[in-house]
Structures are given as structure tokens and as C-alpha cells.
Image (cartoon, grey):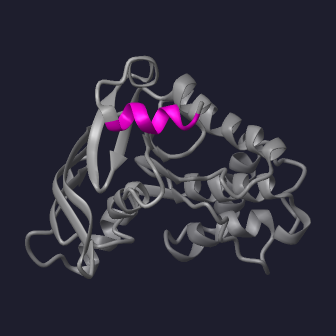
Amino acid sequence: MISIQGLKKSFGPLEVIKNADLNIEQGKVVVIIGPSGSGKSTLLRCLNVLETPDSGMISIDGQQLDFNQRVSKKAVGAFRQLTGMVFQSYNLFPHLTAKGNVTEGLTTVKGVSKKDADEIAERLLAKVGLADHMDKYPHQLSGGQEQRVAIARALAMDPKVMLFDEPTSALDPELVIEVLRVMKDLAQEGMTMAVVTHEMRFAQEVADEVIFIDGGVIVERGAPAQIFTNPQHERTKKFLSLLQ
């Protein structure tokens, strides 16, 4: 489903991703953990080309981008539609209702009729537990509700893979649970997901594989039970010990 080969990304002299190789099978949930500044969010942003890699190749669902040569804007645009991205900040349009935020991309990007877009938005907002909040504006919603609107908006584009970049880190603790519940439901339904998070319990309960990144390098990867109870690399052990 997802294949990353020889991926490199630098910001000026700072090499943030160093020759990364990674495969994610269809229907699997991969959780990416690591210290701040380790490159985990940059890796995720490279997957939908919000950050353009300096070199390497990325393939999703059979479509490939080769960053060892020039990549066209058209190719990037088509590739980006394979992914749904949920950010730490919700990035909702403040002047649109919850439903309007979900329908906007459907009508403007995909050319879906307003009637069909409304039906899709209503179905997805109900799916994330917001059936009674469709006509509310972002300022009338809690942070957890706003993030669930953002998830519904991403799902509306019918992505092949969902990317979550620390989706709960801006939320109060009591609001984290409702967002993680939606993510767990997506995992159970077989959605392919790559998740950058500090929610270690979520990683232990939901992930098929956990990847530990430090200094732009994939240091260790394995099943949650192996990573959290018997890590093999000293750097992984040190990181996890700080979370106890």
C-alpha cells in the first residue's frame, strides 16, 4: 500500500530525514513515535508532499512519485488526493458550519453536487458522533469536536490512507478520548493509517506496528508488545524510560 525508499529531506544544512525506508501494508495502522525534532512529523508530511523530499521514492496504492527527478505539480496534486491529513491544529474554515467544512472540498475539488455533498457530510459527521452539531460553527464546538470535523472532512475525500499528525496534542485530556475513539473505529474498519502521536496507550492498543524515529533515522520498528516491553535498541529504551 505505502512504500518509501531512500527518502531524504533537509532544511538548509539540517538533514531531517536520512535515507528512510518504510513499508505499510493495506489496512494496517503504523504509529510513529520519537522525541521532539526527531523528524517524525516531517516524514508524515512528505507522504502527502506537504514537504517535498530532496530525493527518494514514495508509492501509495500503486501510484509513485520519484523525487530523484523533477516531479510535476499535476502529479503531486493527483498523489495528494490518495491521502487524508489530520493536523494538530484543526484548520477549519471559521465562516463555515461543520457540514460546510466537510462539503467544501467535495464541491470545489471533486465537483460533487451540493445534494450529494450534503449527504456525504451528514453521513460522516454522524459517523464521528456529531449528528447533532452539523450546523454549528467552529467557535461553537469544543476542540475535540473540531478535530472530529477535521477527520470527517479528510474522510470525505475518500482517501486510500489517513495520516494523523499528533491529532490530540492540542486537546484537553478529557477531549482526547473522543478523538481516539473515532481513530480506533477507523482502524477496526480496515483504514490504512500512519499516526504520529505521544499517546502511547493508543499505540499499544491499536497499532499493528510501532516505529521509533530519532535524528531522522528509523531506529527501531516492531509490534507494540515488542517495542514497549522488549525494545532492542538502547536509544529506544532510553526514550521509553522517560515516559514511565
Which part of the image, by quadrant, shows the N terminus? top left
Residue at 23% x, 79% y is: 13
Residue at 38% x, 56% y is: 38
Q: Residue 63's image quarter? A: bottom left
Left or right: 96 in relation to 74: right
Which part of the image, by quadrant, shows the C terminus? top right
Examine the rendering and report whether any part of residue 28 can be seen: no
In this view, the residue in front, 8 or 127, is 8
Where in the figure is residue 194, as x and y percent of width and height? 43, 44
Where in the figure is residue 116, as x and y percent of width and height? 65, 59
Q: Magenta segment, principal secondary structure? A: helix
Q: How many marks on residues?
A: 0
Left or right: 19 in relation to 118: left
Where in the figure is residue 32, as x and y percent of width and height? 42, 43
Residue at 50% x, 32% y is: 241
In the current view of this chain or complex, which residue is farthest to the left? 69
Residue 217 higher or lower than 227, as above or below: below
Where in the figure is residue 88, as x and y percent of width and height? 61, 60
Residue 73 higher or lower than 226, as above or below: below
Left or right: 84 in relation to 73: right
Q: Is 196 contained in the magenta span?
A: no
In this view, the residue in front, 162 or 12, is 12
In this view, the residue in front, 52 or 173, is 173
Residue at 82% x, 48% y is: 130
- Specify the segment rendered in magenta: 235-243
Examine the rendering and report whether any part of residue 237 can be seen: yes
In this view, the residue in front, 112 or 126, is 126
Left or right: 208 in relation to 59: right
